[in-house]
Amino acid sequence: MRLKDKVAVITGGASGIGLSTVELFVREGARVVFCDLAPQQGRALASTLGDAARLHHSRREQGGAHDGAAIAQRLGPDTVFVPADVTDAASLGQVMQTAVSRFGGLDILVNNAGVGGGEISIEACPEDIFDRTIAVNLKAVWLGMKLAFPLLRARGGGAIVTTSSISALRGMPGQGAYGASKAGVLQLTRVAAMEGARDLIRANAVCPGGIVTPIIYDSPLLKQGFDRALLTDAMAKAQPLPQAGQPEDIAHAILWLASSESAFVTGQEVVVDGGLIAEFNTRQRAPDPKARTGAGR
């Protein structure tokens, strides 16, 4: 087992990438405390944000909220669910303290909770949606790191893994708030890696591409009559590897970064996107005839 007797906190652990990570960590021997919004909080936040921003961490694939307590019961006594708002220091602090009181400390923090950015331009984005996106996707990551550092130091080191996005790596129309928040996560991860290195605390990020998670099912395309199978097929065809990414693909990358197998890796982002960013980076523009002949100089 790659995480035997390690204690992990995973935010946004009740659905999608977070749930896959919780399940994988438990199979690999970890004792896990995971948090998510309580169902009523998730519904309230989704209603507040509307179509412009959707939850990663409190929606079922069928459109409702996951029951974190039921998930913990299914996974066994080494798994604990704590309802929490990751943007609130006291609420997130209670999650960390649960790891200490139940399992004796903290070895791994996975910052996974987040909200999607929808498809909304900078000009059209309401201020409250921008603020909430930054709060959940960036401020909460900072809070998690701030609270985890002394606990990881007390254990002689540990690992912080944060979910970013390929939206942090490319300028994508309609992804202003979301892309900015996820780019901020990458820089925060680099700084955390430098500040934690002396204490053997590693910090890395994972940048998923198109992954079949509950947030994808809130796509405007589905509201226009597309079904899920067609959308998943379209995702598979949009990247070099002809298959849609699954939450488990990201969970396995997170597992590697959390384990001793990546003991010499810190301050890095691991892209898991079926080759999409590589395709963007190697795509050639049509040559400019004037540049080739020297005309126009």
Image (cartoon, rainbow, N blue to C red):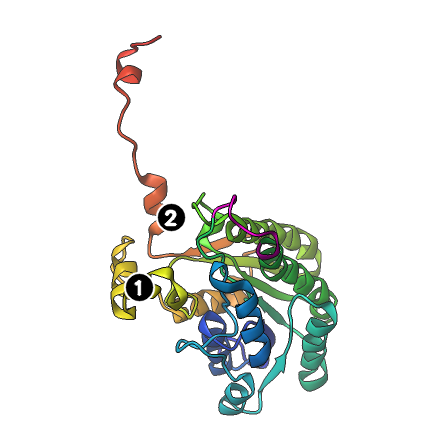
- Indicate left or right for 94 with 141 as reference: right
Residue ID at (68%, 72%): 92
- Indicate left or right for 143 with 285 as reference: right
Given residues 281 and 92, the one toward you in this image is: 92
Residue ID at (29%, 53%): 239
Which of marks 1 and 2 precedes in the sequence? 1
Dot 2 corresponds to which residue?
Answer: 277
Is residue 102 depicted above or below 112 in this figure? below
Residue ID at (44%, 53%): 119
The answer for how far apart the CA atoms under marks 2 and 1 are is 15 Å
Magenta stretch in the rendered image? 121-129
- Indicate left or right for 69 with 235 as reference: right
Dot 1 corresponds to which residue?
Answer: 244
Question: Quadrant of residue 63 in the image?
Answer: bottom left
At label 1, counting other C-alpha atoms closer than 10 Å, the crowd grade (few under 14, some 14-19, many 20 or more) is many
Question: Quadrant of residue 279 in the image?
Answer: top left
Q: Amino acid at mark 2?
A: Ile
Q: Amino acid at mark 1?
A: Ala
Secondary structure of residue under mark 1: loop
